[in-house]
Amino acid sequence: MLRALEKGADGVCVIGCMEGECLYKTGNFRARKRVEQVQRILQSIGADPGRARMYNLSSSDGPLFAKYAGEMDAQIRELGPNPMKKKKQSAA
Amino acid sequence: MIVADKKPVEEIIEYVKDSKKILVLGCNECVTVCEAGGKKEVGVLAATLRMYFSNQGKEDVQVDERTLERQCDHEYLEEIRDIADQYDAIVSIACGVGIQFTAEKYHSIPVYPGVNTCFLGVTEQRGLWTERCQACGQCILAYTGGICPVARCAKRLFNGPCGGSSKGKCEINKELDCAWQLIIDRLKAIDRMDLYEKLFNVKDWSTDRAGGPRKVEREDVQI
């Protein structure tokens, strides 16, 4: 997640299985903790924590996936481009 | 193992904010297990610092990553001998031992701590580490059912619980087990309550930290 944001991704969305239905038992709970950790890190360096988000849905839930993707899209459009991307481009 | 906890990133930034080339140095041992200073944490801290400097418009600051097998042994610390001089700051996220040994070996490079070293302890569950040993230098676990009153009794008592022990808990914190209750329960379980009758002599604390920095010197393994 941090690598993607560092390289200029405008946002990172992690989608896990429904809570309690993860094949790896606690994998999606651990993923949520990591997303929260990334949000705290972003906040600590003055970046917007909203650039990282976590959703849970079932693999058969296409419409919900589309809804979440739309939400994430709206969120990062509101935040604007990742400032690190702009700086990397100007440095190049 | 030695248990450490991550320092707030704001504190680490304060140490290195004026540096131009920084090495984040991890350790593959205890701090990896307690998720404070291993390869994964090196990657997270280095990425965080790079993003911080980028946000500050300091695109020229370079933050590199390296994780050594151990930072408390000469041979592993020597692995960065060829590159260490390139850096004007090293952030070590090994325990305090590793941080100090790195600073000793690379005398002219500032070495900053990226963790707070806490105690010698165990992993009770993921994300929960608790203290077990204070390295007092004179182990008495043979007489206390394998439970240490030095590390686990708030008063370091040697001859049974104090009056503050209530329902198996310590008076300083109702969630903290009374070490002597644990000892008695364990001595009963191994049928060695006779040991509870043994009176301890006054402990020789000269082997503890009170005597200053300690050393173990073994001629049988020295070359």
Image: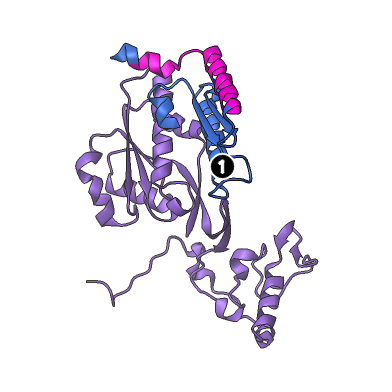
Chain colours: A blue, B purple
Q: Amino acid at mark 1?
A: Asn
Q: Position of residue B96 (x, y in %)?
A: 43, 50
- Above or below, B173 against A15 in this view is below
- Above or below, B115 against A8 in this view is below
Q: Which residues are magenta?
A: A63-88
Which residue is outermost to the left? Answer: B82
* Residue plotted at (49% across, 34% down): B9
Q: Position of residue A59 (x, y in %)?
A: 55, 36
Residue that numbered label 1 is attached to: A28
* Residue plotted at (53% across, 60% down): B121
Q: Is residue A2 left or right of residue A91?
A: right
Q: Position of residue B141 (x, y in %)?
A: 56, 76
Camera-side residue of B128 and A17: A17
Q: Position of residue A27 (x, y in %)?
A: 54, 45
Camera-side residue of B217 and B189: B189
Q: Quadrant of residue B55?
A: top left
